[in-house]
Amino acid sequence: MPSGYSKAYKKYLVKYQIFIAFAIICILLSVLTPNFFSVQNMVIVLRQISINGILAVGVTFVIIAGGIDLSLGSVIALTGVVAALFSHPGDYPLIVPVSLAILMGILIGTVNGLTITKGKVAPFIVTLGMMTIARGLALVISNGRPVSNLSKSFNFIGGGNFMDIPVPIIIFAVVVILASIILNYTKTGRYIYAVGGNENAARASGINVNSVKLFTYVVCSGLAALAGIILASRITTGQPNAGVAYELDAIAAVVIGGASLSGGIGSIIGTVFGALIIGVINNGLDLLNITSYYQQIIKGVIIVGAVLIDRKKSK
Amino acid sequence: MDIDPLYILQAVNISKSFPGVKALDSVRLDIEKGKVHAVMGENGAGKSTLMKILIGMYTPDSGAIYFKGTKIGFTSVDDAIKAGFSMIHQELFPFPHLTVAENIFMGNEPAKSGWINRKKLNKDAGLLLARLGVDIPVQKLMKECSIAEMQMVEIAKAISNNAEIIIMDEPTSAISGREVHTLFAIINELKRQGIAIIYISHKMDEIRQISDTITVMRDGKYISTFAKSDIGHEQLISLIVGRELSTVFYKKEPATGEMVLSVKGLTGSRFKNISFDVRKGEIVGIAGLMGAGRTEIVNAIYGLEKIYKGQIFIKGKRVIIRSPKHAIKLGIGLVSEDRKHYGLVLSSSVKHNITLSALKKCSNGPFINTQKEQKIVDDQILKLAIKTPSRNQLTNFLSGGNQQKVVLAKVLLNDPDIIILDEPTRGIDIGAKSEIYKLMFRLAGEGKAIIMISSELPEILGMSDRILVIHEGAVTAELNRADASQELIMKYAMSK
């Protein structure tokens, strides 16, 4: 049956549209610039997206559960500064700054989550407030100055290679695998989809909705702390002004990856490709010598365009 | 079709279907100018659908509507309002932070080149309210008005649009006796001014008091129309109910097993002093009108609604149920009346919905055992005869009956001792209905205690061992199956 065939074909297209979009962009850029399609450039792209990718994975949890987190950029700065303050050469073993930064992230996620669930304040408001609070804290504890002179071992996290692969890429890969396992193969993951898809039905099914939501904010801020460590290490400085508007790129990646901001829909693999698409476009436009001003316009068009196509599809 | 000039509005042979349901089947309605025309019928009789067609929210599949002799076909509510139709909804949607006057003229403000003439706005609003004989300060904020006052504002808005037909959907459901009196005075004033009122209500005494003509509908069909004086109370009730019990029900022996659930003096925001027992293997039906507080009672037992006073006992032991999670642990299962909001996660698959509240059964620690889950799900799909192309199908794409079976499958997977079914057959076709009845009898046979809320009297009578009738949050009767009849239930459901 030709009609059945074309229907199946269409279904296939819809299901894999993000991969197809990614492939088309890559092919296009390979034709336009000779340097795009090379191993070195691919590694550069992956390293560039690993920070945004880790953030995006975290915020995927929050968005699938029906929330939003705007505080990520500030959490990156705050946790980067915290890590840097304890990473001067000869001060403490690496585990200390790393654990402290991650704990700080978890603490912020807990505050966000509790204010949203127990305090019943809208996630947008809570995390908007946290955005300025965390930024302020980063400035306070660093006296407003970049924290530099960091140990070699700390700088290895963002700048080193392991078996010729940049460490951030490895961390990103591990995060992606763990996050996929949690979302697809654990009870908690299932509950996250249920809470975002229909909070009332989830509660009536015996799910502790508040603790599920809290979990997503803790994961999100915890991963932001990880990204904060990587960024501070990569620029060898705890920079209290770092990470401004990073949350927007992360949310964009999640949305391009097919998640719904109203919750219940989304996937880690989609988010990864969303981050890849943003990364590849940034990289390609760089190679094409298009100024960053135009890059911003193009990126904006792509974000809205991707969602527009997605909405058309779901109708 | 001859148009009778006596009528300002004639709806002829109106039919409307929704997926799986024929909501209206060749219905007619003839409305006279300056009269109050009551439309009566059980829940699901098709009154709301008919009104939504008149006001332009739905387009009928077939049939014609004549307004003052001309055939009309509204494509939007806006069209209908411009033509002179208005509807006062059961639930009002005012703009709370604007004044009474601003609400009355919303979308229709007296203005000159975009600038609102406030003086005229307030003056005209005052005149309109005076025309209704009510005294509400026009500058009062809407949020400070009582519900009765908001209703009057809505009516004023309707006449400001020069409405010739005003539809009132259960206008007294949220107002008190004195306010009802004022409303009726207004309705009489509107009649005097030649406006036709279509009045929907379940309340017999009101209908007797205010209406001139009564049309009865049942199961989406037009039954008949009378002048009020031509029909008696009992006769009206039997026309509204009017069905013989269909044969899909299976009689069973009344249960005599041990007491599983006892509720004593339960009081909450929408119900007071509710007491009843359910035995092992028994089906207890809860009857009553929509909004009587039935859902709130069972939700309270399931931990979804606050309990102010009263006690719940399960197998003789006092329990305090804090959450649905806790209720499930105590062996209670609830199938909600509102499948889409409380039953299913529509964005998730059949599989994920079925195992949602019993993931423990198919996981090792935090991890889900996919194979075990699939087996459990396939079992449930088979057992409940859920028609789905695959277990991974999104529940959003299933028919109403199959969605309901998915919810049942989810609830039954926890193997509850007490099963609460709130309108278990609402909006599903007759085939799926009878499957659900069969399932209920099987479950009762297995010794489950079942509570079923239903607005369909044949269902209540056909299924229940015992029937509780609820009126305005209180039990007005407890009837044994043998003593119950549709007329009796309706009588207790409509009055104390």
Image: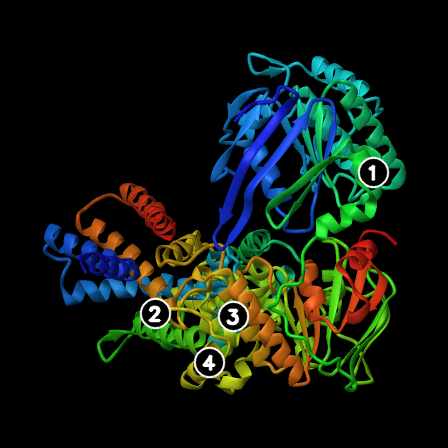
Which residue is nearer to you in this view: B485 or A200? Answer: B485
The percent position of residue A55, horizontal first and vertical second, equals 42, 63
Q: Amino acid at mark 1?
A: Arg
Are the residues under marks 2 and 3 on the same chain? no
**In which quadrant will I find the N terminus of chain A?**
bottom left
Secondary-structure class at tag 3: helix
Subunit that carries the residue with mark 4: A
Q: Is residue A96 at all visible to an observer of this figure?
A: no
Distance (Cα) linking label 2 and label 1: 81 Å
Front: mark 1 or 4? 1
The percent position of residue B305, horizontal first and vertical second, equals 74, 64
The reply, left or right, for residue B113 in relation to residue B98 is: left
> Which quadrant of the figure has residue B341?
bottom right
Q: Amino acid at mark 2?
A: Gly
The reply, left or right, for residue B108 in relation to residue A235 is: right
The circle drawn on residue A158 is 2
Secondary-structure class at tag 1: helix
Q: Is residue B429 at all visible to an observer of this figure?
A: yes
